[in-house]
Every structure is written in C-alpha cells, then in structure tokens.
Image: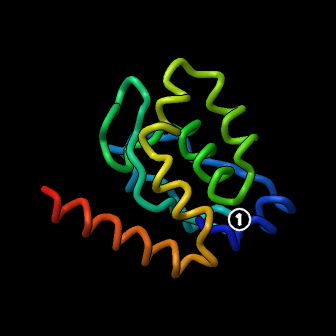
Amino acid sequence: VSPADRGVLDEMGLSVIDCSWARLQEIPFHQMRAGHHRLLPFLVAANTVNYGKPSKLSCAEAAAATLYICGRVDAAKAVLDEFSWGKEFIRLNEELLELYRTSADAAEVVKRQNEWLERVEKRG
C-alpha cells in the first residue's frame, strides 16, 4: 500500500481478508476477482491478541493503516476509535505511518521501510 493507491481506494473502496495467520496459506488468492491486491509495509500490532508483534495486525488495524497511508488520516482514526487499543496503534506506528504517507509510491514506501528497519536494528 502506498499513497499512490489513493485513487484505487477512493474509486473501489477497501476490503480486508479476515483469517488466522496460521491458516493464511489456505486463502485462495487466485480465485479473488478484485484486481488491486496490496500488502502493508512493516507495522506493529496494538490489538490485545498480538500486541507488539510485527505484521500481526487485526483487520481494523490493517484497514486503518491503509486509510492512513493513503492520506485518509481522519477516517483511519475513526476506524480505530471503535477499539480500546485504537489510539495505541497510532502511537506505536506514527513515525512509520508518516514515513509511508509522505512517500511518492510503493517503491519509496519499501525503501523507507527498509531504511527504518536498518536504523532500528543498529540501535539494538
């Protein structure tokens, strides 16, 4: 997902796949008719089941992250306001969400993600 996807989001809307991470390989992605599949960059979960785990987002977190990255920050916050941990998701990921939201395209999102991860890894 990148800010370049805002047009697709505005025109087609947003959907997420609700499944257990342990069963992700069972999802028949090839049978899905929509033509705009996207993956999220690195983010950390704030939900009560996977708090602090990288990339183990709930559907609400994934939807909010997509909205945020595509410039729909108020809509992202509105989704998260429905959950006791919603504000925590923004707090944990705000630096990354802003890096992604201000990227030009998917390539820049990946570049910024990787640079951020390298910096964090060096800090130990």
User: What colour scheme was applied to this rendering of the protein?
Assistant: rainbow
Residue that appears at 34% across and 73% down? 115
Question: Does residue 54 lie above or below 61 as drawn?
Answer: below
Image side of residue 89 versus residue 17, left or right: left
The quarter of the image holding the N terminus is: bottom right
Percent across and percent down for residue 60 are 58, 36
Q: Nearer the viewer, residue 61 or 26?
A: 61
- Residue 55 drawn at (x, y percent): 38, 50
> Which residue lies at the image location 61% right of the left edge and 48% below the top edge?
16
Which residue is nearer to you in this view: 21 or 111? 111
Query: Where is residue 92 shown, x and y percent of the image?
Result: 42, 40
Height in image: 8 above or below 96?
A: below
Specify the amino acid type for callout 1.
Arg
From this viewpoint, which residue is outermost toward the front? 123
**Residue 117 falls in which quadrant of the image?**
bottom left
Give the quarter of the figure containing the C terminus.
bottom left
